Amino acid sequence: MKPINIQTNANELYLDCNATTPVLPEIVKAVSHAMETVFGNPSSSHITGLKARYILDTTRQLARKVIGSESGRLIFTSGATEGIQTAVVSAIYAAMQVEPSERKKYLLYGATEHKAVPQALEHWNRLLGLKAQLLPIPVDNNGLLDTQFIAEHAKDAAMICTMAVNNETGVIQNLTQLEGVIREHNPHVPWMVDCVQVLGKKALNLDETTIDYAPFSGHKLYGPKGIGFMAVRSSAPYTPLIIGGGQESGQRSGTENLPGIAALNALFELMLNKESQRFKSEATLMSYRSQLVEALSSAFPSIVFNHDLNHSVPTTLNFSVEGVASRDIMDVLDACQIRVSSGSACSSKVTRSFVLDAMGLDEWRSGSAIRLSFGPATQQEEISEACIRIKKAADALKNSCLIVADTNNDNDAQLDGVVQLKYDDHCCYLVIDRKAKEILIIDPHPALAGRIENIVSCQHYRVKAVVATAVTPVISQSIELLSPILMPSQSKNEQDIFGWPEAEATSCDAVPVECEGDVNGCVSIGERRLFRVGTRNPVYVLSEPAALKSQVHSDFLFTGAEASPSAYQCFIGEHTLLCPGRDAEHHIAYTPCELSGDFPIDDVVDIPVGDTDEFWHRDDLLIIDVRERQEHVLSDLPCCAEVINVPLTEVIQFIHNNAHLRERDIICLCRSGNRSQIVANVLKRHGFNSRHLLGGLALLGSPAA
């Protein structure tokens, strides 16, 4: 088996530091030294063990200085999640030590807490049998906790969990104010504060607070993964989570992760060394943020920042761009070698931000949020380069009609035929005739309305119709929204409830060869015809180009999510592609023989990263880059093979147009391997000889030609 060899990318700008951080060279050196030289067991009494014990003890002392905690416990853990579990177990076990009738009935946690907190509370509450009610503490539009809610419920709380800085928005909680409210109404309730995102960004002095548990994680501040620590107040109840060995004075058993602790040692030395300037001042970090805000606002005129910058650490920006999906922004930033986080996965499955939902922000903001985060060791050169690349990324989006601009180089001018847009598992279809500059829209979704409007405006298309296969609240809302904008000259009484333009569709100059009956008129799209079939849950049949023909073949059939196959069976020809209304499994399109739901085909072949030499040097291959056009034009593929760009949205038309390519050796690729696997599977189902690059271009770094 070949060793895994994942390439690095020297041009990468990593702006996802709230997720994890790169390990600083000084810290790498400390880890390497500990592994190579100071490898002893700190519990051993010989000299090698004593050297290891010295690192352990000095790191604990440095940690106390960094967080201002000279008293109480300071325990090394595997990370913040273990610290959270330990705190929750300690508090709940303590709450169980009274008579059942006297036990507190609530476990309070901030509604915007990291999921590790409520899930830990739920888990240990059930396992230990406290049977308390979990109550999320509401937040306002700025993400700040509702102190009145805390005041009303604190007296009956067995534990209260809050966080210092939110991981998605960077919002800073006022710990002094929270402490005043909590201690006024319940002086002894165990209070945990998740301090993961505050370390290195705001000063801490835990001894001046009554915080009982403060978990930290090393990998959020330039350390390796798998190491963390927690501070526990002297008077706080404490129950070890891990027992067996007596390490950490019996408070956390298991041989200590000495290389990780050595990493913390180096980190704390850097933080305490005011002359090194390794970590930037708060003023410098705010300057970085101002530069990024200016660049983003200039690049994306419709940008909205999802948090008040005055209530946030300067290292986090959370934003949404109206009318543009977070996936589109993240993909094009990734093509520009900028790494950020998105609320949406690479697939079309939509993931909303529970943090932004809790803050009461609009649904589109929650579903299209981008988080950009840098660290306190970020350099000015990185910020300057990021600002340049942000503009480049926005220009690519403008050129692909994802953002409307005064001028467009127009990457999407190549759109022609059937285009599939998806939101979650909902399928919307655009039927475009590039030559005639006409478009027809089938089953739009409100979340796609901005994208559709941008395409129409950017390309100056004439909209022939906006139609539906069913009268559902979602589709009806979309038609109500889009029709007046895209077809202002057409009144509502000229359409039926499905948006079908009755006046224009009363007569047809062509009929489908497969089945001439049951056609309820047609609408022309350039040389094609869209036929409507049925009146209750209509389906739509798109013909081949009909120039000088009275009869045409059915090329595409749009079935919607409600229609029965019996309603459109006779319209299916040998080469008709069936376009579903729902597509949770990413089948994209069906062949006539797949109506039974059977897919008797082998799984697509994966190409591991280590087997890509043929990929770059064989000129007989056909490489299909399934990234969006704006990604494709930003990063070249240095290879000898023929390369064509077929985004997911255009796969249906590609299958229809390219039966002659079924014998070619095809390799699909994308950024991460997710989209390319989908396309390779679809092509294989439709008779193509397709494979895909496992892990995508992300694992290749910068491949050599």
Image (cartoon, rainbow, N blue to C red):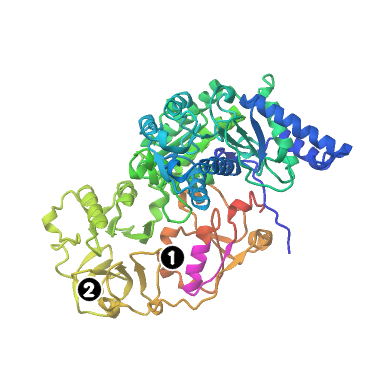
Q: Kindly report which numbered mark, 1 or 2, lies closer to the viewer in this rendering.
A: 1
Callout 1 amino acid: Glu
| Label 1 vs 2, first from the N-terminus | 2
* Residue lying at 41% horizontally and 63% vertically, measured from the top left: 584
* Residue lying at 40% horizontally and 42% vertically, measured from the top left: 135
* In the image, residue 626 lies in the stretch drawn in magenta: no
Asked if one can make out residue 109 in the rendered structure from this viewpoint, the answer is yes
Residue 324 in the figure: left or right of residue 617: left
Q: Give residue 356's position: percent from left, percent from top.
A: 40, 40
Q: Is residue 197 above or below residue 134?
A: above
Q: Nearer the viewer, residue 1 or 490?
A: 1
Quadrant the N terminus occupies? bottom right
* Residue lying at 70% horizontally and 54% vertically, measured from the top left: 5
Callout 2 amino acid: Ala
Q: Which residue is mark 2?
A: 510
* In the image, residue 686 lies in the stretch drawn in magenta: yes
Asked if one can make out residue 409 in the rendered structure from this viewpoint, the answer is no
Q: Quadrant of residue 653?
A: bottom left
Mark 1 nearby-residue class (10 Å; few <14, some 14–19, many ≥20): few
Q: Which residue is mark 1?
A: 585
Dot 2: element = loop
Mark 2 nearby-residue class (10 Å; few <14, some 14–19, many ≥20): many
